[in-house]
Amino acid sequence: MIKTVLVTGASAGIGRATAIYLAQKGYKVYGAARRVEKMHDLKAYGVQPIALDVSEENSMVACVTTILNQEGRIDILINSAGLGSYGALEDVSMAEAKNQLEINLFGASRLIQLVLPEMRKNKFGKIVNISSIGGKVGLPMGSWYHASKFAIEGLSDCLRNEVKQFGIDVIVIEPGSTKSEMIESGSADLMRVSGKTAYKDLANAVIKSYAAQKDKAIEAVEIAKLIAKGIESKSPKTRYIASNAKVFLFIRKLLSDQLFDKLVMSQMK
């Protein structure tokens, strides 16, 4: 049976690459995003674009209901929609902080709630949550982004043991730096929020650090392949780590908090 997949954040980056890659592998893929106009070309790859705003309850319900009405099932949910909003904790407004969590955490959680009843009924399902290297390591100027990804990691651990009894797997994907519009938009956001505050020197240092790492960013399709590996495994790993994140996360395990902080801040000059 052809599996039906819902990929959020399909207008760009990892979501777009994943929707295309899975459609080319023969899955029935619905690519969902707010910016539907940016997904028209996905039809050429066999992806069905569908409108979805993960910060709006009615939009999420309508999206899932439409797919269930058309396909009768959603076998795989890939929570790829995300926002990278940056700035010193002191500088970020609570409204922006809540928006970050609304998109990266609560939107993903609500979609999981909406797809679980049918997955339980079918005794099959794969829920893929896109975390980040930032779900294991906190870096300066990204407190709310990292908070959202740390939360996704914990949520996934809890959920995995709740739904395993129904034949549903929960998989976490941990990308490192990935080529996407988020790098540029995140840098611009950081300067908007903290570029003229008491944290301006650190903000500039962080921007330089990001620029230095840009050449190490991998193509989004590499993450799509990692996702495919997870959902096609009968006994998937709980976590799949991108190739360019493994060394960094290994070092994090070895070092104390204080030594790791020194290592991180040595790159922020």
Image (tube, rainbow, N blue to C red):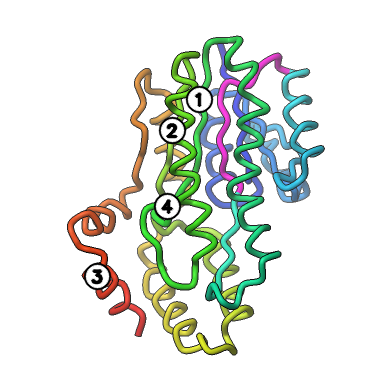
Element on which disc 4 rests: helix
The Cα atoms of the two marked residues, 2 and 3, are separated by: 31 Å
Compared to 208, does 170 lie above or below?
A: above
**Relative to 28, is 234 on the left or the right?**
left
Residue 12: say if magenta.
no
Please tell me which residue is depicted at 70% across the width and 44% down the height of the picture: 54
Number of the label disc, if any, that sits on residue 95: none
Binning the other alpha carbons within 10 Å of mark 4 as few (below 14), some (14 to 19) or many (20 upward) gives many
Point out the stretch of residues depicted in magenta: 71-81
At label 4, which amino acid type do we have? Gly
Who is closer to the viewer here, 217 or 231?
231
Q: Residue 160: x percent and y percent?
A: 44, 28
The Cα atoms of the two marked residues, 1 and 3, are separated by: 38 Å
Number of the label disc, if any, that sits on residue 171: 2
Residue 77: say if magenta.
yes
Q: Are marks 1 and 3 in contact (CB under 8 Å)?
A: no
Please tell me which residue is depicted at 61% across the width and 22% down the height of the picture: 116
Q: Which of label 1 and label 4 is nearer to you?
A: 4
Element on which disc 1 rests: strand
Where does label 4 land, which residue?
135
